[in-house]
Image (spheres, rainbow, N blue to C red):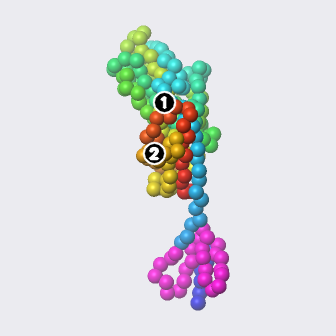
Amino acid sequence: MDYATKNYMERGGDRWIIGGTLDRTGSPSLAELKAMLVQHYQVVPAAVSATAVLAATALTDATQSITTGITNPDVPRTVTVKGNAAGIVGNVVITGTNILDEEFSDTIALNGTTEVEGIKAFKTVTQIDFPVETHAGTDTVSVGVAKKIGLPHIVEYAGMLLVKLFNGTADTGTLAVDADEIEKNLFALNGSPDGSKLVDLYYLV
């Protein structure tokens, strides 16, 4: 009998595949087994805050690139932008690094006094680009942190999140995954972090 194998182990006449496939003459389909590991990720996120990264900063009649006065998120997490008055518009571009220290940016559109959350998790923030003011001489914008936590791995499917605990109790938060950008693999915590409660995530990679 002919076999086409890759990375297999043999014992007692049976064959198991590790990270490969096994073709058996006459078999209806290929069989594939993949070894996966359970990862435990634990963080203690601080409370959400609209000013955690940058305090309210005045907009002007020209665009600005802010590189000082910035506080990095306490753990890799999404950031927010918030204006001080109704009608404020324009894009705020946040530049920084992800959990792997790779540089990237996230563009977040201002929506008046509504706090708007980005879609990527920042480990560090190195630059914030502000748009021009909407109302002359009075507009300010702050940059904060939200509750979505960035994972240290790219996870294939959201269903691979096995256990999610907040302060030792099951949390009803959800996982969003992305196959290309690690900073988009985000756990949306349902509980309210305060800088003392543990978040424990167990998932397969």
Q: Residue furthest bottom?
A: 1
Helix or strand or loop: what does disc 2 sit on?
loop
**Who is closer to the viewer here, 137 or 77?**
77
Q: Is residue 162 left or right of residue 74?
A: left
Specify which label sits upstream in the sequence, 1 or 2: 1
Residue under label 2, please give it: 171
Is residue 145 visible to us here? no
The quadrant of the rendering that contains the N terminus is: bottom right
- Residue 151: give x, y in percent of width and height: 55, 45
For image coordinates 64% across by 75% down, the residue present is 8
- Residue 43: give x, y in percent of width and height: 58, 40
Question: Is residue 14 found inside the magenta-colored segment of the image?
Answer: yes
- Residue 160: give x, y in percent of width and height: 49, 56
For image coordinates 43% across by 24% down, the residue present is 82
Question: Is residue 195 found inside the magenta-colored segment of the image?
Answer: no
Magenta region, residue range: 7-31
The disc placed on residue 48 is 1
For image coordinates 45% across by 20% down, the residue present is 141
For image coordinates 41% across by 11% down, the residue present is 138
Q: Real-space Cα distance between discs 1 and 2?
A: 17 Å
- Residue 51: give x, y in percent of width and height: 50, 23
118 w.r.t. 23: above or below: above
